[in-house]
Amino acid sequence: MYFLRLVVKNALRHKLRTTLTIVGIVVAISAFGLLRTVIDAWYAGANASSSARLITRNAVSLVFSLPLTYAQRIRQMPGVTTVSWANWFGGVYISERNFFPQFAIDAPTYLEIYPEFLLSAEERKAFLTDRQGAIVGRKLALQYGWKTGDQIPLRGTIFPGTWTFNLRGIYDGATKTTAESQMFFHWAYLNESVKKRVPRRGDQIGVLIEQLKDPDQAATVSQAIDSTFRNSLAETLTETENAFQLGFVSMSEAILLAIQAVSFVVIVIIMAVMANTMAMTARERGTEYATLKALGFGGGFVALLIFGESLLIAAIGGVAGIALTFPLANAFREALGTFFPIFYVSDETLTLQLGAALVVGVVAAIFPAWRASRLPVVEGLRAIA
């Protein structure tokens, strides 16, 4: 207890210096946490994917579609329990700024494959029975103030025209990693309209989603699907949902590496600032440390004083920085809207922040503590005039 009081009094001797150092640590730790959260958000889709789901797309590119007939053939393959499909719609709500993911789905099978989208029994029934029905995530509904029963007009980009949907349900995510900023409507409604306007584009789907009986059979089933359609007019590429999501992440890999580098550079910079602060502190108290040694306290006690003060300052700054991360992340999420469907500060990020703060405190104190512990008593007392 006496040791802790001594450490606290030492830290408060130069209030301005200590305050500025803590502020610097707060800024660094909160910035580190925010950058790590951005990285986590980029990988959120891949991390939330299921090992029991496969995605089949056109082998050339996602831009090219697949015939609907593929679904029936895949459904008969061993190891596949359910097959569904989806098309990216790409519509705009009111203005170009209001963009969010929209998918035309085969609703009964899609909701079966994705049980993490939670709907009440009434909402599910209303959606399934309404040809123009749609469901949206809770986050998206809150953003635009939608409620069940509203009509949502979308201006098509890939599929021209104005499309009006009846909001029949608002789904919640089973976990916080479930995206709640998407919209789903019936593929059959889209297909009917497309066949009337451009018949040759009818009965075409963007991706097929397969539910597996055994996740360990993912590689075998993927090969079987792609072999079935090899040398056809629309060859396929089948991969796990995780690999499919990581394919999008890899397009911005250079950006992610830059963000990761910046997050660690911030910690290194504040570590240098903290080390300078502790070096100044130890240099100013050389005579005091020498006096303590003359009174019988060992070099280890002196080193512990310096480590204790450094860790106290770093811990206060670290905890304050962690606390500041939450409002910063909320503001960042609000500013970006639906750009990141999943954006939250994870437990892993909090652990990294706290660990970074403690590492800064320890590293910053190593050299000053070593130097003070080895300072000869006579040399330290010479400074007393």
Image (spheres, rainbow, N blue to C red):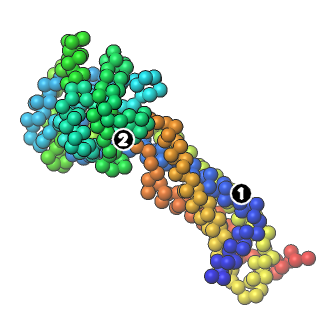
| Residue carrying label 2 | 138
> Which x, y percent locates residue 19?
71, 60
- Residue 245 seen from this side: no
Q: In which quarter of the image is the N terminus?
A: bottom right
Dots 2, 1 in contact, CB < 8 A: no
Q: In this view, does 84 lie to the left or right of 379?
A: left
Instruction: Decide if residue 92 is in sight here.
Output: yes
The amino acid at mark 1 is Leu
Disc nearest the viewer among 2 and 1: 2
Query: What residue occupies the far bottom of the structure in this picture?
Result: 296
Q: Quadrant of residue 274?
A: bottom right
Dividing the image into 4 quarters, which one contains the C terminus? bottom right
Where is residue 26, by image quadrant?
Answer: bottom right
* The furthest residue to the front: 149
Q: What element carries label 1?
A: helix
Question: Relative to the observer, which residue lies in front, 1 or 384?
Answer: 1
For the residue pair 69 and 234, the one nearer the viewer reads as 69
Q: Going 34% across and 17% down the picture, which residue do you hit?
A: 162
Which amino acid type is marked by label 2? Arg
Q: Distance between the residues labelled 2 and 1?
A: 42 Å
Crowdedness near tag 2: few (<14), some (14–19) or many (≥20) residues, C-alpha within 10 Å? some
Secondary structure under the numbered disc 2 in the rendered image: helix
Q: Mark 1 points at which residue?
A: 20
